[in-house]
Image (cartoon, rainbow, N blue to C red):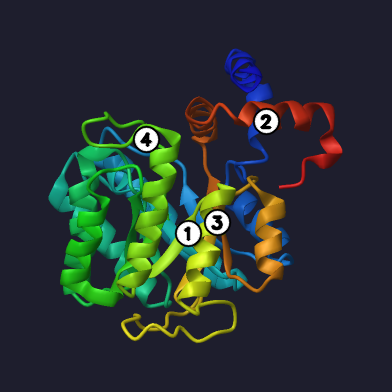
Amino acid sequence: MLSKMIVAMTLRMPRWFVRWVSRRYVAGATLDDAVRVMQRLESEGACFTIDVLGEEISSMDEAQYFLDEYVRVMNAIVEHDIDANLSIKPTAFGLLINKEQGLENIESLVRQASQHDMFVRLDMEDHRVTTETIQVVLDLHAKGLTNVGTVLQGRLHRTPDDIESVASTIGSNADYRICKGIYLEPEEIAYTSKSDIRCKTNEAIRMALEHGAYVGIASHDVPVVDYTLAVLDEFKMGPSIEDPRENSGPDRKGKGPGYEFQMLLGVRGPMRRKLTKAGHRTRVYIPYGEKWYEYSIRRLQENPTIGLQIAKAFLMPWTNRP
């Protein structure tokens, strides 16, 4: 309740205050800001995935902006020799405005990224584009572009079927980020209780690993991380161990031995560093862009538990280490 009250107050504060709060979770407004943050965190053994902030757009001119900006991101990664890949939102590339052109934009970026052995993650948005996003991945794999994967959300009823369906099409070439899911979907298509969401997320992680897929465990939930560590031990997977699964996919540049842990910038830093110290590959999600304010407000609204972190950062700024 206290955390929700703090978030409610923050949402009514001036823009400068929201920017102060968000600097922990957003690299900044520019690509240079993102590069500086990644260079700083590299010393902690982290690798990265970069997200240019912005989702659904209103014109294909905006889609061209995102394509051009991600090409800049890709070039910066290569120039600075950063261990990073790309996270994109299909609707930002025009998928809901002009599907054909949107697909061409996504393919163009994935094709350019493949020339640098760089992976592209299609972020999962709300249920309107779940099927389309998965299909984009399958279509690109059919064209020989295997440096692309998507996100599956534990909260959705359909996720086990999606894992089975993708496995039947591209087998162990599948590459997922498994997360709980941030979109509050209707109960007809999604689990709504915390316990159910956690349980189903755990089941999705196990199922994806059983199918030989590469799995990014994107969770700050201690029970989910602990469950994953137990499953990895059961499968005899772990740091510095060649993936022992007989059905595992190919090794990829910049990837772990069949799995990795992924966390948002500024969230659960101590947990991330602990996992890294234990030898696990850990990837930090780096958002940046002019839409930092909209992103920050959405994050606050979606996760009211951030309120206690805001209070801690304000009253004890020396503890505010992401």
- Give coordinates of residue 187: x percent, y percent: 27, 30
Label 1 to label 3: alpha-carbon separation:
8 Å
What residue is disc 4 on? 183
- Callout 3: few (<14), some (14-19), or many (20+) C-alpha neighbours within 10 Å? some
Sequence-earlier tag: 1 or 4: 4
Q: Is residue 245 visible?
A: yes
The type of residue carrying mark 2 is Val
Where residue 306 sits, quadrant-wise, is top right
The type of residue carrying mark 3 is Val
Mark 2–mark 3 contact, CB under 8 Å?
A: no
- Callout 4: few (<14), some (14-19), or many (20+) C-alpha neighbours within 10 Å? some
Mark 2–mark 1 contact, CB under 8 Å?
A: no
What residue is disc 1 on? 217
Q: Residue at x 42, y 54 (%)?
A: 202
Q: Secondary structure at mark 1?
A: strand
- Give coordinates of residue 51: x percent, y percent: 47, 50
Does 287 sit above or below residue 228?
Answer: above
Does 153 sit above or below residue 46?
Answer: above
> Along the horizontal axis of the image, is 292 left or right of 136?
right
Choose between 160 and 175: the one closer to the eye.
160
